[in-house]
Image (spheres, grey):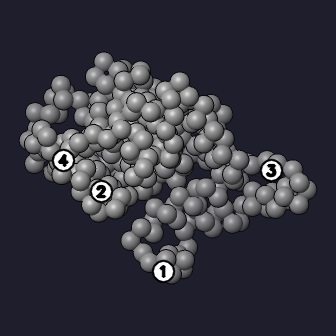
Amino acid sequence: MSGIDYREDGNVARVTINRPHVLNALDAESDSELRRIWEELEVRRDIWAIILTGAGERAFCVGADMSAPAVRQTGLEYWAQERPGGFGGIACRRTLDIPVIAAVNGYALGGGMEMVLGCDIVVAAEDAALGLPEPLVGRIPLDGGVFQLVRQLPHHVAMGLLLTGRQIPADRAMAFGLVNEVVPRAQLGDAVGRWLDGILRCAPLSLRAIKQMVQRSEAMTAPAAMRMRFPALVTALTSRDSEEGVRAFQAKRQPVWRAE
């Protein structure tokens, strides 16, 4: 068993880290399975949104399984390994154009927070907590944490978290802009559903184009990015869905998207 549950609900993929006995920490097998899932989803046109969460009520993911053989590596040995996409293959992945919602149902620490930083929309239970505690055990957030955090937060806010390893509650993370919405635990599923509904009302090819444009233009100025021919942009603008959207608007009806 890989410890990763995967199921599809229409055009939605639901990915659950199911290792609650270790607070959904990833070992080599579960990390490998997540990477396989992202690689397969990248070429799927029929999946329009992804929900990533953890099993149980205590944790989204607390990073690497410290009981696993991998932790016997030195920090230098770990850093020297190739880990495309960062922690769980999602922390800094730039080739997955499908919108990803993180449903943070508990602790998101270390690699777990790195995965949250790699998602597009983050909904958290009010008793969830986030942090990068690696320095407290003599390690470093190498799988996207350092570089993602300083790009997503003001410098001093990011450094305050990185240089103390402290955890912050979900509402504080929302105040910093790391989380989109915080709700009571019992309402987490409904809140995620509302964000999902908002995604599914939009043309899937348009959303793929938007995400690809954002991901592939991070190092560009806005004028330079506007001159780029992003593949997903061309696909969206020449699609049947782009015509369907205009027809539906003119007819005052809901569009029927086909991702083609």
Q: Residues within 10 Å of mark 2 (few under 14, many from 20)?
A: few
The answer to which of marks 1 and 4 sits earlier in the sequence is: 4
Does 205 sit left or right of 116 as displayed? right
Q: Residue 124, how many percent across, how many down?
A: 46, 36
The answer to which of marks 1 and 3 sits earlier in the sequence is: 1
Residue type indicated by callout 3: Pro
Q: Residues within 10 Å of mark 1 (few under 14, many from 20)?
A: few
Q: Is residue 106 visible?
A: yes
Quadrant position of residue 240: bottom right
The answer to which of marks 2 and 1 sits earlier in the sequence is: 2
Tell me the distance, in whole angstroms, between the alpha carbons under discs 2 and 1: 29 Å
Find residue 255 and name its label: 3
Residue type indicated by callout 1: Ala
Nearer the camera: disc 2 or disc 3 = 2
Residue type indicated by callout 2: Val
Quadrant position of residue 242: bottom right
Tell me the distance, in whole angstroms, between the alpha carbons under discs 3 and 4: 49 Å
Find residue 224 and name its label: 1
What residue appears at the point 29 percent right and 52 percent down from the top-left corner?
144
Circle 4 residue:
164
Mark 1 touching mark 4, by CB under 8 A? no
Q: Residue 51, how many percent across, how many down?
A: 52, 37
Q: Is residue 36 visible?
A: no
Tell me the distance, in whole angstroms, between the alpha carbons under discs 2 and 3: 42 Å
What residue appears at the point 57 percent right and 36 percent down from the top-left corner?
192
Q: Nearer the viewer, residue 245 or 113?
A: 113
Tell me the distance, in whole angstroms, between the alpha carbons under discs 1 and 3: 33 Å
Does 202 sit left or right of 155 as displayed? right
Tell me the distance, in whole angstroms, between the alpha carbons under discs 1 and 4: 37 Å
Q: Residues within 10 Å of mark 3 (few under 14, many from 20)?
A: some
